[in-house]
């Protein structure tokens, strides 16, 4: 076994080995409160020899010491993957096809046993958590962070329904995730035999690019091919497979039992749609007429890996680029042509080239003014012209179109326009600085502006290479501040939170998926393998998925979770003058999410004053680097900070596209 | 005489705006037509929906169209006072309230020297006000000149200013915009 095999099991080898060696002699206590609460007893059953010592040494502070992992993790990591051979079940046949397709990861909870077990046995990396919903968000974030297809799974009935929020969010974000749910036998259909039988396709029909109920194991390879054709071509989106018991259990005995048993190079193509010359000519003509053209680089630029072509095209034509989409960084924020942090300039654009903008804004949702004319580049002809009227539509893979445009477009100059973009960027940064100075005056809790500014200082102007750290940019109210300061300097450095669908509570799941992506160095995260990640969220979100902190700890993910804890849902302030309504939007005050994290095997830090935030961040980062363990920084805020009359600037809005956008 | 024009009808005379300024004998009517041509161009490009113009006997024009967030908008053009008015643009804004003051400051800032020329409200050519009456803010643009070129520029300017004002409101008064235009709270 090598380190990679360990990590694919979700285990950091060095941490694991150290742990096993230490187990009988060095398992020091968790905190006193853990002992008192009996949590150690609950978790210690897997390391009984260590448990009594741990309990007896309970008075020593051992922050950062992980809870013991069952020895089964090491056993699993040392067990070589199986090579599927006939006879095999339908589930194994399907898993074999997924492995051949390079399925990068499966995030799930126990359930859908035949399929998920088959995947684990043949060596597809499987990561399990506490709730299917969070695991579906993990898969979404993994794919958005890497560009690689991942999968998530739920068992029949409630496991399947738990996946729905993640599926809807993945659909809105156009994330190519394979959603698999098991189902009962076809023979039991409509009969309410036993439990958990449920028809699935009507539930997911509007949330997927393609769906299929599998009933015949002989065709599992064929339908895997259908699924991956959909996942790896055109506009990305999720695919749903409903795995009946027949499709999973049935045994296949001889090669002839497998229908359409082609290799992937025979059942799908890597070819991409290319632009028509006439439409390229029209686009270039429109751009040449423009005084203030701009490019919107969105999700499709990421999935088609078009960032180099985009940069060449922008530099040759001197056309500024503003980002939108489910992930950011394909065009670096510090590039002289970046308009991502120049919201005030956007209304000046007269020609807008939308590239890979799958989630289409309607008129007025983007900052471009009524005089702007639009060019759209998209692989799906049927989508061009939706919502925004366009003057030229180019049906093409984004990278293919940009490569042609680089060749065909003449060099251009837009000096005055670029100067306007730069001035707007400076104005935006100046506004941010002024905002930070303003909120520093609030000392009784931590204002989100402090988190935003100081996080940016730490990430981009400290000792860490600015392009290194992946950010999960979530939250509701807090995000209105953090997005103003967060920057992206390389592809998928920012995973743009609950993009488009706005699911509250996805964030710890995102931290799991994005954390695995970076920890294992998948896809575009390869150069940043093993580095800590940071995810920001509100306390409402943490309430949904905080238990996945245990998953972060179990998988030894060096993640930092920043919880903005203002004791309320983000919605409370709109009801502030409705006394009978306000309590509906409030929690108990000053909840110790940090202690919850500690109880779950992670680290916790409670920050109650502005001056404590940066030291806490540094400590959490150091812990992540040195131990590969997660930390929850529970930042105590104050709900009244959203009230602009009392605490200006109060709750902020946003301008799209660009640094603050997350609707489109 | 009242006149109804629609985007479809206007498209039959796409070059009308180009010739308006050549007609020196009917400056008043040309001003309304100049505004009509500008707005009709937006309609032709589907920026506006259901665009209609009414010409009134008193020398004013009323222009109706659907635009941002699917809302109906009404613009009037008063030739006697050289005034364009986007009526009742923002509801629920009390006169001299904090929001009203900020809107006024925003509009005043549009005439600042630091604003790019193509976005700037040139005080030599026009002035802009946020008029609050009975809780409704209207955007009022008064021209310095009465020629059709000025009216065309004014029409384009007031539409762009409305767009920028909505951007500003979305950035700093998001809650108001959600509640007023049913944009959803997330």
Image (cartoon, coloured by chain):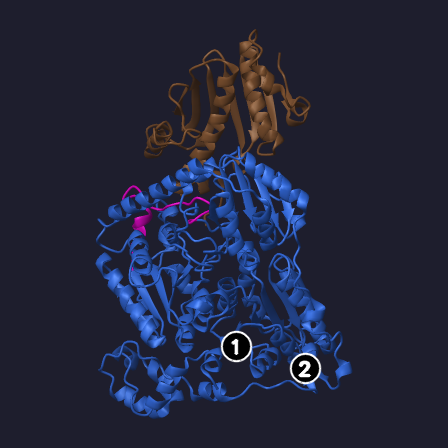
Chain colours: A blue, B brown
Is A366 magenta? The answer is no
Is A638 magenta? The answer is yes
A157 left or right of A365 in image:
right
B174 left or right of A390 in image:
left
Residue B50: where, in percent of width, then height? 62, 30
Query: In what element is the residue under mark 1?
Result: strand
Magenta stretch: helix, strand or loop mostly: loop
Q: Which residue is mark 1?
A: A126
Where residue A249 is drawn, which disc sits there? 2
Closer to the camera in the image, A656 or B61: A656
For residue A571, above or below residue B47: below
Q: Which subunit holds the residue at mark 1?
A: A
Query: CA gap, disc 2 to disc 1?
Result: 20 Å
Check contact, mark 2 vs mark 1: CB within 8 A. Answer: no
Residue at 59 percent of width and 41 percent of height? A284
A108 left or right of A613 in image:
right
Residue A464: where, in percent of width, then height? 32, 63
Whether residue A619 is visible here, answered yes or no, is yes
Mark nearer the N terminus (2 vs 1): 1
Q: Which subunit holds the residue at mark 2?
A: A
Q: Residue furthest right?
A: A256
Closer to the camera in the image, A214 or A10: A10
Residue A373: where, in percent of width, then height? 56, 37
Query: In what element is the residue under mark 2?
Result: helix
A57 left or right of A418 in image:
left
Where residue A8 is drawn, which disc sits there? none
Magenta-drawn segment: A636-660
Q: Quadrant of residue A462?
A: bottom left
For residue A552, above or below residue A469: below
């Amino acid at each position: 076994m090598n380190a990679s095999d360990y990590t694919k099991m979700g285990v950091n080898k060095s941490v694991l080995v150290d742990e096993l060696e230490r187990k009988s002699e060095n398992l020091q206590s968790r905190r006193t409160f853990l002992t008192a609460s009996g949590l150690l007893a609950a978790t210690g059953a897997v390391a009984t020899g260590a448990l009594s010592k741990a309990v007896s040494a309970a008075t020593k502070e051992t922050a950062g010491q992980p809870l013991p992992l069952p020895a089964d993790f090491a056993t699993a990591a040392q067990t070589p993957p199986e090579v599927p051979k006939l006879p095999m079940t339908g589930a194994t046949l399907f898993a074999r096809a997924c492995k051949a397709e390079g399925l990068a990861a499966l995030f799930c909870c126990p359930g859908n046993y035949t399929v998920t077990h088959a995947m684990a046995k043949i060596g597809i990396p499987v990561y399990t958590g506490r709730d299917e919903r969070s695991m579906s968000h993990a898969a979404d974030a993994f794919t958005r962070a890497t560009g690689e297809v991942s999968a998530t799974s739920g068992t029949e009935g409630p496991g399947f329904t738990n996946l729905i929020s993640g599926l809807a969010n993945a659909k809105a974000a156009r994330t190519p995730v394979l959603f698999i749910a098991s189902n009962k036998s076809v023979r039991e259909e409509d009969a309410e035999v036993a439990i958990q039988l449920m028809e699935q396709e009507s539930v997911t029909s509007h949330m997927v690019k393609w769906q299929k109920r599998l009933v015949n194991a002989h065709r599992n390879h064929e339908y895997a091919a259908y699924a991956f054709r959909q996942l790896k071509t055109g506009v990305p989106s999720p695919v749903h497979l409903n795995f009946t018991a027949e499709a999973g259990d049935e045994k296949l005995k001889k090669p002839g039992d497998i229908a359409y048993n082609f290799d992937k190079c025979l059942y799908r193509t890597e070819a991409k749609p290319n632009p028509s010359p006439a439409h390229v000519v029209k686009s270039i003509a429109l751009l040449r007429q423009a005084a203030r053209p701009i490019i919107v680089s969105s999700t499709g630029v990421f999935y088609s890996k078009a960032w180099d072509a985009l940069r060449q095209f922008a530099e040759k034509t001197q056309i500024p680029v503003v980002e939108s989409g489910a992930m950011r960084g394909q065009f670096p924020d510090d590039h002289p042509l970046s308009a991502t942090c120049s919201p005030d300039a956007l209304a000046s654009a007269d020609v807008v080239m939308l590239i890979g903008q799958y989630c289409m804004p309607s008129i007025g949702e983007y900052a471009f003014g009524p005089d702007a004319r639009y060019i759209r580049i998209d692989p799906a002809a049927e989508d061009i012209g939706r919502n925004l009227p366009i003057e030229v539509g180019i049906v093409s893979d984004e990278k293919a179109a940009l490569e042609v445009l680089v060749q065909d477009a003449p060099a251009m100059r837009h000096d005055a326009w670029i100067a306007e973009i730069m001035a707007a960027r400076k104005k935006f940064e100046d506004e941010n600085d002024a905002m930070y100075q303003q909120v520093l005056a609030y000392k009784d809790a931590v204002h989100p502006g402090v988190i935003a500014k100081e996080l940016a200082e730490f990430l981009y102007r400290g000792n860490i290479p600015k392009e290194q750290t992946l950010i999960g940019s979530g939250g509701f109210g807090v995000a209105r501040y953090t997005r103003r300061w967060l920057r992206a300097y390389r592809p998928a450095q920012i995973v743009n939170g609950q993009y488009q669908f706005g699911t509250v509570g996805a964030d710890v799941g995102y931290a799991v998926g994005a954390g695995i992506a970076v920890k294992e160095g998948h896809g575009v995260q390869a150069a940043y393998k093993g580095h800590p990640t940071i995810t920001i969220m509100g306390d409402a979100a943490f309430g949904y998925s905080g238990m996945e902190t245990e998953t972060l700890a179990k998988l030894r993910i060096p993640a930092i979770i920043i919880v903005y804890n203002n004791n309320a849902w983000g919605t409370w302030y709109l009801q502030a003058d409705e006394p009978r309504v306000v309590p509906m939007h409030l929690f108990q005050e000053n909840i110790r999410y940090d202690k919850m994290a500690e109880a779950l095997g992670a680290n916790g830090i409670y920050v109650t004053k502005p001056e404590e935030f940066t030291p806490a961040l540094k400590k959490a980062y150091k812990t992540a680097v040195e131990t590969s363990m997660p930390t929850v920084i529970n930042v105590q805020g104050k709900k009244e900070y959203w009230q602009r009359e009392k605490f200006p600037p109060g709750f902020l809005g946003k301008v799209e596209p660009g640094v603050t956008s997350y609707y489109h | 005489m009242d006149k109804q024009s629609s985007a479809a009808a206007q498209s039959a005379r796409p070059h009308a705006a180009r010739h308006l300024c050549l007609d020196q004998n009917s400056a008043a009517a040309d001003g309304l037509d100049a505004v009509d041509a500008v707005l009709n161009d937006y309609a032709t490009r589907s920026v506006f929906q259901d665009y209609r113009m009414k010409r009134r006997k008193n020398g004013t024009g009323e222009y109706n169209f659907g635009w941002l967030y699917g809302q109906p908008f009404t613009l009037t053009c008063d030739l006697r006072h050289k005034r364009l008015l986007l009526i009742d643009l923002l509801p629920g804004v009390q006169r001299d309230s904090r929001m009203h003051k900020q809107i006024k400051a925003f509009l005043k800032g549009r005439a600042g020297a630091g604003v790019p020329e193509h976005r700037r409200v040139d005080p030599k050519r026009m002035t802009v006000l946020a008029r609050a009456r009975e809780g409704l803010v209207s955007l009022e643009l008064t021209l310095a000149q009465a020629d059709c070129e000025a009216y065309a520029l004014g029409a384009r300017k007031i539409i762009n200013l409305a767009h920028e004002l909505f951007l500003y409101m979305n950035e700093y008064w998001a809650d108001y915009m959600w509640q007023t235009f049913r944009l959803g709270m997330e």
